[in-house]
Amino acid sequence: MAVVVTEIRRFPVKSCRGELLDEGVVEPWGLRGDRRWMLVDDLGEAVTIRERKGLLLVHPELRDDGGLVVRDTSGSGLPDLSVDLPTGAETTPVSLFRGTPFLAALAAPEAHEWFSKAVGDAVRLVHADDPSRRPANPAYAGPGVPMAFADGYPLHLTTEESLADLNAQIAEGPMAAQGPLPMVRFRPNIVVAGADPWADDGWARIKVGAAVFRAVKGCPRCAIPTTDPETAERSKEPTATLARTRRWDGAVWFGTNLVCDTPGVTIRVGDEVEVLETRDPADGPPR
């Protein structure tokens, strides 16, 4: 059975609702349009679902020119907002997880006001106008891999079989009523089907259509997958089950982080996935 792409998803604004795509161009810093926008607090630190779970009820749509149309489904009554791509003339230092600050372009004041009302706290909207300002961790990604606002690496891949296995384990556990969980909880860019459960632990290089990727590191999971994308309510799964079955180095793991070695290539739903190089998965994902 061939391994094929079943979903492609981008998240225009970090931690907000995503968009399903039929195809997407892979740029050096990730899927085109993915996580190029982000909310920050007064200190420039990223504001995410971890602190503000209601961000999942904000629906951004990427315009053809890179700008946004955003709507809020929380019942706040906020009107839809159109946000133009900033010129980059006004920048501000920003950071993720208290890391090294880098510059990002500020959106217009009305965007800050709209998102502050949606979030319930003072935030600003910024754009990664030059992703080369933020490199991925060279210990895993290699030198000079640019990043926009994804957590750690340009793209994230998951497999349907791993989710099916996880859901089966949840169903057998003490919190069975919290499953089954949809894949969107893990916010991947690429979903594939046709592999064995957890097969991506052993992938080192893969080809998706005509695009070649390095699988550089497994994905340690935070509280985000415990948040229902439709209601923004939190539960204990999947963290509780992953802590029993997929725990290494004090973290729980699901999915694989990718770096593209052939930027500019378009990937599509239905593309076949070829495993070019493998690693020993006996000790879990690369980490």
Image (cartoon, rainbow, N blue to C red):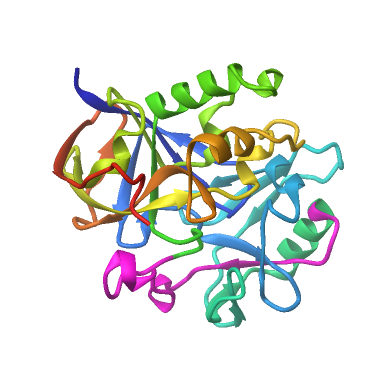
Is residue 163 or residue 273 the one in the foreground? 163
Looking at the rendering, which quadrant does residue 267 occupy?
top left
213 lies above or below 176? below
Where residue 252 appears, x then y in whole percent? 52, 46
Give the residue at the far left of this rendering: 276
The image shows residue 178, relative to residue 78, as above or below, that is above
Q: Is residue 26 magenta?
A: no
Vertical order, 179 against 253 (above or below): above
**Residue 128 among magenta residues:** yes
Left or right relative to 94: residue 164: left
Whether residue 236 is visible here, answered yes or no, is yes
Which part of the image, by quadrant, shows the C terminus? bottom left
**Residue placed at 59% from the left, 17% from the top?**
172
Q: Nearer the viewer, residue 199 or 105?
A: 199
In what quadrant of the picture does the N terminus appear? top left
Residue 238, position as x, y percentages in the image: 60, 34
Residue at 69%, 23% (x, y): give it: 175
Q: Is residue 277 above or below residue 100?
A: above
Instruction: Please state the horizontal and vertical placement of residue 148, each as a whole percent of the image.
Output: 46, 64
Is residue 13 left or right of 4 when viewed as pictured?
right
Q: Nearer the viewer, residue 179 or 143?
A: 179
Please state if 149 lies on the left or on the right of 210 as rendered: right
As rendered, which of 200 and 130 lies closer to the eye? Answer: 200
Magenta segment, which residues? 119-147
User: How many dots with numbers?
Assistant: 0
On the question of residue 180 being in view, the answer is: no
x%, y% of residue 30?
37, 56
